[in-house]
Amino acid sequence: MLWGPNTDEARAIVDEALTHVRDVNHFDWTFIAILALVFIGVYVPHIKEKKWDAIGAALGLYGIHWLCEIVNAVICHFAGYGMWHVTQSSTSFILLIGVSWELSMMFSIAGFGIELMPEDKHAKIMGINNRVFFVLSMSLGFSIFEIFLASTSAFQWVWPFWGAIPVWILVYIPFFIAAVLGYDLKGKKKKIYLAAIWAQVALALAILCPLGII
């Protein structure tokens, strides 16, 4: 499936899913297990080894992920449907209309893939700057996998103009650009960059959640 099906069936699935956003009735203990694995298994070793650049990449990507999910939820509030939706069929908790707990935890560590890049930001892979190669290849891989996700009951595209190509350009490329910046920026610039992203996330959540917009 390359594009949203634009069918009544897809809308019915999404309409049902919208009633389960932040519904704790689907909670199970995998929620805690995944959180522990992410923090203790991934972040703690990086903190212990002081791999601040890799952590900066992970937090940069994760912050942009949250901003994209917030924008998607705002679109849903005003247009009736977002660009993408998750359903209650395979999650312990839906955070926002387009992201489940399990999916969000995956994005919280996706930026660590940047450790596959050469330290030299000018080195080339297949004749392409390695940073550009990383952004294009990783974002394309995620976009292709989303085609599979959209064919399952757990993830839904609705709008006919939304699909693998726009999600690659408008979502995943920005994700991995954010990771590269979080990795390559140094010192005070890195701190300002990450603080600016996460301040926007915190402010948006603090305003929009109580208003019932997201």
Image (cartoon, grey):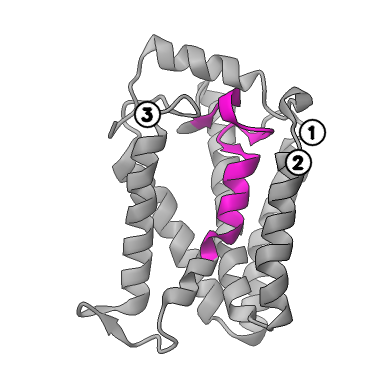
C-alpha distance separating marks 3 and 1? 33 Å
Q: Quadrant of residue 190?
A: bottom right
Q: Which range of residues does the magenta coloring cover?
A: 85-111
Q: Are marks 3 and 1 in contact (CB under 8 Å)?
A: no
Local secondary structure at mark 3: loop
Q: Is residue 209 left or right of residue 117?
A: right
Local secondary structure at mark 1: loop
Q: Which residue is label 2 attached to?
A: 207
Percent x, y for residue 211?
Answer: 76, 30
Position above or below: 171 against 22? below
Position above or below: 32 against 93? below
Q: Which residue is label 3 attached to?
A: 151
Residue in the foreground of this view, choosing between 157 and 83:
157
Q: Quadrant of residue 209?
A: top right
Residue type of the residue flagged with mark 1 = Pro
Residue type of the residue flagged with mark 2 = Ile
Percent x, y for residue 102?
Answer: 61, 43
Residue type of the residue flagged with mark 3 = Ser
Q: Residues within 10 Å of mark 3 (few under 14, many from 20)?
A: some
Position above or below: 124 against 132? below
The mark lying in front, picked from 3 and 1, is 3
Q: Quadrant of residue 37?
A: bottom right
Q: Which residue is label 1 attached to?
A: 210
Q: Residues within 10 Å of mark 1 (few under 14, many from 20)?
A: few
Residue drawn at 61 percent across, 72 percent down: 56
